[in-house]
Amino acid sequence: MAKLHMSEMEQVAARHPEIFARSFWSRLRTPLVVLAAVLYGLYCWWFFAVGTVLHNANWSLAGTYLADWVSYEVRPEFRMASDGTMQIRYPRYSPLGDNPNPDWLIATRETVTRTVELPAAAVSAQPTVKKSATSFMAPGAALGGSATEAAPSAEAKTVTRTEEVVTRAEVLMGRSTRIEVLPGNVVVQHGDETLHVAMDGKTVSADSDPLPQWATQKRPGEKIVISFGLAGWAEIEADEVSIRKRFLGWANFIFDTQSPFFGKPAADVFSLIAWGERIDPSRSNLSLAWNNILYNHEWQHLDVWTKLLQTIVMAFVGTVLATLVAFPLAFVAARNITRNWISNQLTKRLFDFLRSVDMLIWALFFTRAFGPGPLAGMSAIFFTDTGTLGKLYSEALENIDDKQREGVKSVGAPNVAVQRFGVVPQVLPVFASQALYFWESNTRSATIIGAVGAGGIGLKLWEAMATNSDWENVASMVVLILIVVFVFDGISNALRSRLMGRSR
């Protein structure tokens, strides 16, 4: 094909300008498309109230959640007593162990002797039975009298106790941040600002109005929440002060506080495992350490890994079953393979029905039918992927080259041989590639459907999120899911490239 030179093009345009003249609508096409996109974006902004949502969003709370993913909190609580003393308590499973004594909490302690009056016990009258030497019945029973006598009621008692109490405590939240806790009074120093808070057992009041930017109180007299960013936060209530001091890292990820290896340096743990004396006479230190890791009650590694394996199996089995069922049905749905309009339409409508219902909805349905567990998840993946793969397979069959099939048919081969040697070689790499992609995708989807009770790590992930405090556990499971997805993505890409005859 000969090409015109630029000068020749200009000569043609000069002689026939109507050929190169653009119509009115063709000149406005691009500006109209851009204008329509802008108007649609403005409509979406108004309809979904994006501006209001962004303005009212609690960005500090979002930052706190993100910080919780890569950190842990130590949560001492200061409870006020009526006699002007305090007690420090930690949660049952504190990251510091059973007897925490952190260096960032300085407490002044005293030993006091108290006389406590115990209220009268509400003890019901207990029947006392007088036995007879001649009968197992109580005297008077045969005469219609009462066989019981009321026990005397309990009286109030006074008990003297010796207890260790806290009279003052100071919590160091950072270089320029500290919280001093006294009975009925809290002093917070953050940078150059100082806040005094009074507690009378019923209300909380501050000496500053308005409060500093880092302190909030919804209504007068209610608790005051103090936020220090990544360092942590605190709540001051009428009779209690709760501290949340944050540290980077995942506490007790290897050994929990109940393990004999807890708190030991890595070198000491290695030496104990390699040549130290047995901690448990019934097993080696290596076996004990591995058992402590698997059954870490704070991180539950064995349970998490088992649920992750369930997720992988759910995705694999569901995809394999869907591929096996969609493969023959696709031949029925393809119009150039099965010359029957009714069979084509019934099969295609079945595919439409299976894929039109989202996998999450199928998971809810099968969870109600089979109960929570991986069977519901596998069934949801099987149903959804059967419809989607069936549609893709049938469309691929309808687009094959008929020359290869006609060539096999011309030698007198039966219909089964025609499909086997004339059709399958053309579509098999495509079918396998699509099945591998769905296997990789279902590994991610199985996590989502697991959150509704369909088994797998998704359910474990949802349980950790529901606590609203174990975000470091959520982060660890998300990391595991990402690793699995990355590995499966690499395997799937390698297999697809091999099937399609391409090198990576």
Image (tube, rainbow, N blue to C red):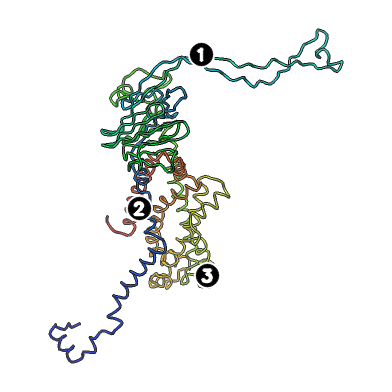
Give the left or right position of residue 374, taking residue 252 as reference.
right
446 shown above or below 287: below
State the SS at label 2.
helix
| Percent coordinates x, y for residue 312 in the rendering | 42, 46
Extreme residue in the right direction: 143
Residues at circles 2 and 3 in contact by the CB criterion of under 8 Å: no
Q: Which amino acid does label 2 sit on?
A: Ser
Give the quarter of the figure containing the C terminus: bottom left
**Disc 1 packing (10 Å; few <14; some 14–19; many ≥20):** few
Disc 1: which residue:
160
Q: Position of residue 27 (x, y in %)?
A: 27, 80
- The residue where tag 3 is placed is 345
Give residue 298's mark: none
Is 21 or 122 nearer to us in this picture? 122
What amino acid type is highlighted by mark number 1? Answer: Thr
Q: Distance between the residues labelled 1 and 2?
A: 73 Å
Q: Is mark 3 on a helix, strand or loop?
A: helix
Disc 2 or 3, which lies upstream in sequence?
3
Is 488 on the left-hand or right-hand side of 333?
left
Where on the picture, by quarter, is residue 293? Answer: top left
Whether residue 76 is visible, yes or no, is yes
Q: Position of residue 363 (x, y in %)?
A: 51, 52
